[in-house]
Amino acid sequence: MRINLDKLESTFSKQLSPVWLLAGDEPLLIQEAADTIRQYAQKQGFVDREVFHAERQFEWNELLQAGDSMSLFAEQKILDLRMAEAKPGRDGSAAIVEYCKDPSPDNLLLITAGKMEASARNSAWVKAIDAVGVVVQVWPVKAAQLPQWVGRRLQQQGVRANPEAVQVICDRVE
């Protein structure tokens, strides 16, 4: 299932998907979305977490082995896979497709990645995630939307700012 970032929390009411992909060119938004998923998963009993950094020499079998292995105390765990780019390569793509064929109910795979090119959106690994989980493409905040976005963020933090103050902030960070 593919959703927009603003629909993230409403998907939790249906079911906690076993696989999540957060990709985009806005690291802050991706980090916050990942934090939201991890917090919700922890409330559902996913207390353990293993973090994997998929870099050049990453052994993709480690991810598959972690997905297959049971904890000593049989606790549910989050497999937190972090990729700098949304390009896992041939081995990574094969491993993700293999994982998605039969995801364990005791694991939640959370993949965070950088910007996803159009070609990657139609790749086998993204389609495999889409079939069993949730794909969230995180888009940059557009300049025209920035004042409303900053205003909402300030309100969430309990800060009241008039439109002129919000505009000054936007002018400085745009």
Image (cartoon, rainbow, N blue to C red):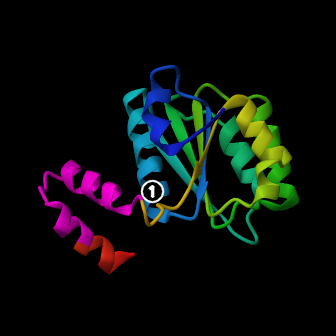
Query: Which residue sits at x=75%, y=72%?
Result: 56
**In the rendered image, the vertical position of residue 146 relative to residue 20, given as above or below:** below
* Front-most of residues 101 and 34: 34
**Residue 174 seen in the current view:** yes
Question: For the residue carrying disc 1, how many other residues have a C-alpha within 10 Å: few (<14), some (14-19), or many (20+)?
Answer: some
Give the main secondary structure of the magenta stretch: helix
**Residue 103 seen in the current view:** no
* Front-most of residues 147 and 66: 147
Q: Which residues are magenta?
A: 145-167
Where's the C terminus, which quadrant? bottom left
The answer to whether residue 160 is magenta is yes
- Callout 1: SS: helix
- In the image: residue 42, left or right of residue 164: right
Look at label 1 and name its amino acid: Leu
**In the rendered image, the vertical position of residue 116 relative to residue 130, given as above or below:** below
- In the image: residue 48, left or right of residue 64: left
Query: Which residue sits at x=34%, y=56%?
Result: 149
**In the rendered image, the vertical position of residue 26 relative to residue 99, given as above or below:** below
* Front-most of residues 118 and 40: 118
* Front-most of residues 172 and 5: 172
Question: Which residue is identified by label 1?
Answer: 29
- In the image: residue 39, left or right of residue 124: left
The answer to whether residue 73 is magenta is no
Query: Which residue sits at x=78%, y=37%?
Result: 128
Report x, y in % for residue 58: 73, 64
Report x, y in % for residue 72: 53, 34
Where's the N terminus, which quadrant? top right
Report x, y in % for residue 99: 76, 38
Report x, y in % for residue 122: 82, 47
